[in-house]
């Protein structure tokens, strides 16, 4: 099989095959710019945050000069993970708990107990002497820290191009132009392949069907039993757009960018109709002027998919990292952000959205999880080897340019699978920086 994506269908092995999963860790994840974490997680010198990417244990550490260094979280002596917690502070230096080799905050080897016993071994020619190794490439974009593990691959600006406008917009929703991570992420384990979760983000023809039993029921209950002279509760306001019509979703549009990125909600979105928060508009006008403030807040793009596994919702300040565990298992991490300098009600809405929609206790997320798990079962059928993504396919379409199409198109999925396939090809030669 050398063709997993034929333009309108993807092969089912993308979702089931563990060998493919292991190849994609190297060919897709290591060669791409992947989001690691937000720099507000590590505000002070010596603060660190750890995560695993493409099976590599990593740590980002705040340096004395304010820079962020991303290291392979592995002692150069015998391989022990040096920083064991999700977050913490290393103090003045890092110390391996096994034999107490120590390292500067940038990973450089600082000391070894009874070092004279290495006098005759020419330690400086051993790889252990290099200390904890930095990753190949790091970029802190307005607080969002991305890494590329492979030495070769596309540069950051070329990889993301105009798609960075989603992150720009999320940052500028803060009157101070600053975001802060709040709390710990919600973790939700799914028994499905990670690409199903990505695919779902631009699947606008499922909400009114799959979420009818949750969002639809909440709306019905409110209509039947709520006091209609009062504003709808926030939960109903957040649920309501899930039951919007095909025409609504078609009209909101989808934009795709090169290299597999894309977003729903070009000219309208399910986040548009939220009620205003008193005082927020005035603060935004004070910071940006009326025209720019309006442009920022009118940009209500819905889900932005950054290839391969980052999902951003700017207007509600949430971000999800889709972490592949195996071909059949995925962990979805949902993070929330505070817009610094904005009224606290915005953060309250963000917290409530994350709880209602993204958490393991969400009423809505379970509809999707049920579909992913049933798909994992159904795909074992030999009746059909292909998964269809042909909706609004245009003969001759290409994936190398920014385009806006109907919001019910599956172009964003095709754009994603095309990039995945390009990276996975056996003869794929990494492009130089
Ligand atoms: S394994 Fe780290 S000091 Fe020995
Ligand atoms: Fe959904």
Image (cartoon, rainbow, N blue to C red):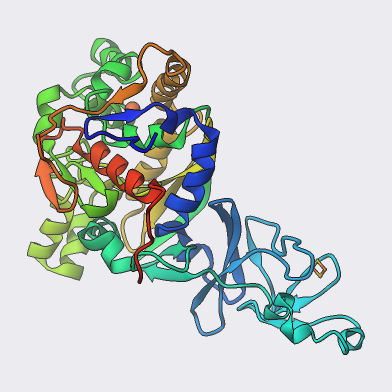
Identify whether 231 is placed above or below 162.
above
Residue at the location (29% across, 27% down)? 239
Q: Relative to 129, is 246 on the left or the right?
A: left
Residue 40, image x, y percentages: 47, 65
Residue at the location (29% across, 32% down)? 238
Q: Relative to 98, is 415 on the left or the right?
A: left
Residue 26, image x, y percentages: 50, 52
Of residues 377 and 227, which is closer to you in this image? 377
**Quadrant of residue 155 within the rendered picture:** bottom left
Quarter of the render that holds ligand 2? top left
Of residues 3 and 272, which is closer to you in this image? 3
Q: Is residue 175 visible?
A: no
Of residues 242 and 195, which is closer to you in this image? 195
Q: How many marks?
A: 0
Q: Is residue 406 visible?
A: yes
Identify whether 341 is placed above or below 68.
above
**Quadrant of residue 357 within the rendered picture:** top left
Residue 220, image x, y percentages: 26, 13
Of residues 99 and 17, which is closer to you in this image? 17
Q: Relative to 163, is 424 on the left or the right?
A: right
Residue at the location (49% across, 78% down)? 67
Dividing the image into 4 quarters, which one contains the N terminus? Answer: top left
Identify whether 235 is placed above or below 159.
above
Identify whether 391 is placed above or below 323.
above
Residue 330, image x, y percentages: 51, 36
Residue at the location (18% across, 56% down)? 281
Dividing the image into 4 quarters, which one contains the C terminus? Answer: bottom left
């Amino acid at each position: 099989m050398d063709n997993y994506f034929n333009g309108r269908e993807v092969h089912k092995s993308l979702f089931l095959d563990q060998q493919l999963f292991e190849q994609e860790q190297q060919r897709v994840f290591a060669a791409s710019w992947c989001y690691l974490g937000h720099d507000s997680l590590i505000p002070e010198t010596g603060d660190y945050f750890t995560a695993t990417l493409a099976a590599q244990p990593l740590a980002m550490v705040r340096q004395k000069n304010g820079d962020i260094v991303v290291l392979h979280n592995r002692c150069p002596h015998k391989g022990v993970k040096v920083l064991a917690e999700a977050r913490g502070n290393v103090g003045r230096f890092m110390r391996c708990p096994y034999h107490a080799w120590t390292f500067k905050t940038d990973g450089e080897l600082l000391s070894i107990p009874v070092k004279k016993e290495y006098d005759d071994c020419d330690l400086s020619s051993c790889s252990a002497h290099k200390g904890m190794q930095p990753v190949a490439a790091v970029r802190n974009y307005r607080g969002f820290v991305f890494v590329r593990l492979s030495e070769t691959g596309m540069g950051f600006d070329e990889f993301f191009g105009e798609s960075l406008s989603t992150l720009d917009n999320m940052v500028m929703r803060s009157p101070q132009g600053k975001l802060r991570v709040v709390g710990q992420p919600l973790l939700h384990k799914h028994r499905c392949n990670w690409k199903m979760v990505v695919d779902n983000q631009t699947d606008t023809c499922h909400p009114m069907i799959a979420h009818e039993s949750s969002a639809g029921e909440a709306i019905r209950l409110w209509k039947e039993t709520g006091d209609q002279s009062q504003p709808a509760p926030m939960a109903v306001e957040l649920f309501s757009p899930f039951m919007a019509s095909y025409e609504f979703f078609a009209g909101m549009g989808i934009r795709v960018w090169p290299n597999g990125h894309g977003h729903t909600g070009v000219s309208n979105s399910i986040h548009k109709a939220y009620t205003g928060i008193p005082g927020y508009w005035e603060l935004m006008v004070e910071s940006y002027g009326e025209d720019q403030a309006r442009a920022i807040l009118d940009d209500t793009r819905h889900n932005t998919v950054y290839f391969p596994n980052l999902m951003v919702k700017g207007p509600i300040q949430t971000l999800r990292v889709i972490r592949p565990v195996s071909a059949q298992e995925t962990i979805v991490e949902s993070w929330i952000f505070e817009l610094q300098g904005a009224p606290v009600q915005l953060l309250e809405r963000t917290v409530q959205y994350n709880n209602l929609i993204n958490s393991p206790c969400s009423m809505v997320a379970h509809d999707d999880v049920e579909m992913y798990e049933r798909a994992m079962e159904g795909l074992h059928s030999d009746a059909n080897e292909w998964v269809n993504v042909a909706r609004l396919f245009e003969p001759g379409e290409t994936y190398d340019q920014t385009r806006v199409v109907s919001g019910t198109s599956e172009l964003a999925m095709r754009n994603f699978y095309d990039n995945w396939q390009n990276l996975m090809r056996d003869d794929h030669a990494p492009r130089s920086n």
